[in-house]
Amino acid sequence: MHSSKARASTTPVRRWRANCARGGEVVVVGGGNSAGQAAVFLSRIASHVHVLVRSSGLAATMSDYLVQRILRSSSISLHTHSEIVGLEGEGRLSQVTWQQRDTGELTTRHVNNVFVMIGAEPNTDWLKDCLALDDKGFVLTGRCTQGHLLESPYATTKPGIFAVGDVRSGSVKRVASSVGEGSVVVQAVHHYLVPTPV
C-alpha cells in the first residue's frame, strides 16, 4: 500500500505512463540516462521491460548505477545491436518487432507501449555563423561572447535573439520546462523591444 504522501509526490505524467504500461510488456528505445530511468521505473509496474539499443551495451552512454540496476533486474531485458522494424495494431499498438542487426534475428512481442528516449540532436547548423553554439550544436545563452552575464538567461550572443527549450544549451529537455522558459522569456523580449528608461 502506498502512502498518500507518496501518491501526492508522483507527477501526473508518471501516473499516466504507469497506467498505460501497467501489467503488460513495454519497450524502451535508447541507451542514455533517461532511458535507464524509464526502464527502472517501468519495471515496477510492467510485466517486463525490453530495452533496445543500437550499440553493444550501456556503459558508454549511461550512468553505472543505472546499468547495474538494469542488468540485475529480472524484469528488464537488454537487447543490444537491436532496432524496431515493425509496429502493428488495430486502433492502438499491440505488437512490436525488433531485429538484432548482427544476426538478423527477428523478435515479435505483444507490446502496447513503446517509449522512445533516444536523445536530441539540434537542428542548428543554419545558426553557426550567427550565434554561439556549444560543441553539440545547442545555442549558448545567458552570457556574451566575452563571458559576462546578460540580462536574461535566455539571451543569446546576438542582442534581440533569445533561445528557450530543447535547443538551448543546458536546458533539461522536458516539455514542461520548455513551456516555462517560453513564458518567462516574454518579459525579456518586451524589455528588448520597449526598453525601460534608466
Image (cartoon, rainbow, N blue to C red):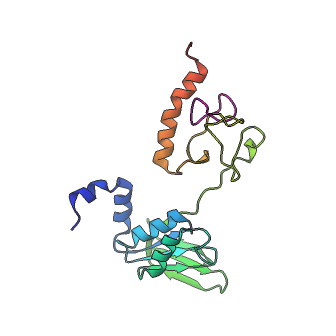
Work out whether 120 lies above or below 91: above
Residue 116 in sight from this viewpoint: no
Residue 130 in sight from this viewpoint: yes
Picture residue at 57% right of the left edge, 40% below the top: 164
In magenta, the rendered stretch is 149-161
Picture residue at 44% right of the left edge, 66% below the top: 92
Specify the quadrant that holds the C terminus: top right
Picture residue at 65% right of the left edge, 87% below the top: 103
Relative image position of residue 86 (x, y in whole percent): 56, 74
Give the tally of numbered discs. 0
- State yes or no: residue 165 in magenta: no
Tell which of 10 and 21 is nearer to you.
Answer: 10
Tell which of 114 and 183 is nearer to you.
Answer: 183
Relative image position of residue 123 (x, y in whole percent): 68, 49
Work out whether 179 lies above or below 92: above
Specify the quadrant that holds the N terminus: bottom left
The answer to which image quadrant residue 58 occupies is: bottom right
Tell which of 8 and 110 is nearer to you.
Answer: 8
* Secondary structure mostly seen in the magenta stretch: loop
Picture residue at 54% right of the left edge, 51% below the top: 173
Q: Residue furthest top?
A: 197
Q: In the displayed structure, does residue 184 sit left or right of residue 133? A: left
Relative image position of residue 158 (x, y in whole percent): 70, 32
- State yes or no: residue 156 in magenta: yes
Relative image position of residue 82 (x, y in whole percent): 60, 77
Q: In the displayed structure, does residue 183 sit left or right of residue 120? A: left
Q: In the displayed structure, does residue 40 sit left or right of residue 144? A: left
Q: In the displayed structure, does residue 157 sit left or right of residue 66? A: right
Work out whether 184 lies above or below 13: above
